[in-house]
Amino acid sequence: QVQLVESGGGLVQAGDSLRLSCGASGRTFRGYSIGWFRQAPGKERELVTAITWSGGRTYYADSVKGRFTISRDNAKNTVYLQMNSLKPEDTAVYYCAATWLGGSYPPLDSYEYDYWGQGTQVTVSS
């Protein structure tokens, strides 16, 4: 059982940056691909970015390419989401999720992820 905890959300202005963290407890992240999803009010949950266990392959949604960066420190059992040039449309609850799948490329569908954090709110004002 992997327990995930997100942190780092908050209220910022458009153009600002935030760094979200996803920490694991219960067992190591070793072998797990990690995804960051977000869900805005009235919208479906969407995959923002994901990274394989090794960190060698990543995926970014078109809406965040060039602005967001995912990284991981397996020694610290932590995955980071650096968000720059934030826009009001980035406002959402952000969730990290873990899956044993995706050795060569991270899974892109939410149903492929087994463990989820409780979410952290990111609000970007214009």
Image (tube, rainbow, N blue to C red):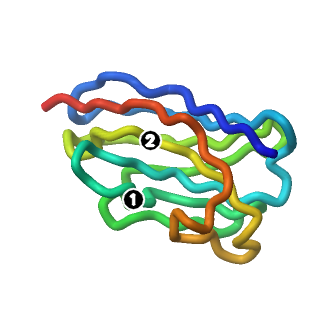
Q: Decide if residue 75 is on the left or right side of residue 88.
A: right
Where residue 61 sits in the image (x, y, percent)?
39, 64
**Viewer-side residue, 92 vs 18:** 92
> What secondary structure is found at the residue carrying circle 1?
strand
Q: Decide if residue 21 is on the left or right side of residue 72.
A: left
Q: Which is more N-terminal, label 1 or label 2?
A: 1
Farthest residue, direction left: 126
The residue type indicated by label 2 comes to Tyr
The mark found on residue 94 in the picture is: 2
**Viewer-side residue, 113 vs 78:** 113
Q: Decide if residue 22 is on the left or right side of residue 109.
A: right
User: Compared with residue 39, is residue 62 higher up or lower down, i.e. above or below?
Assistant: below
Q: Distance between the residues labelled 2 and 1?
A: 10 Å
User: Compared with residue 64, is residue 88 higher up or lower down, i.e. above or below?
Assistant: above
> What secondary structure is found at the residue carrying circle 2?
strand
User: In terms of image quadrants, where is residue 87?
Assistant: top left
Q: Name the residue under label 1.
A: 46
Image quadrant for the N terminus? Answer: top right
Q: Which residue corresponds to the image point at 38% horizontal and 61% vertical from the top-left? A: 65
The residue type indicated by label 1 comes to Glu
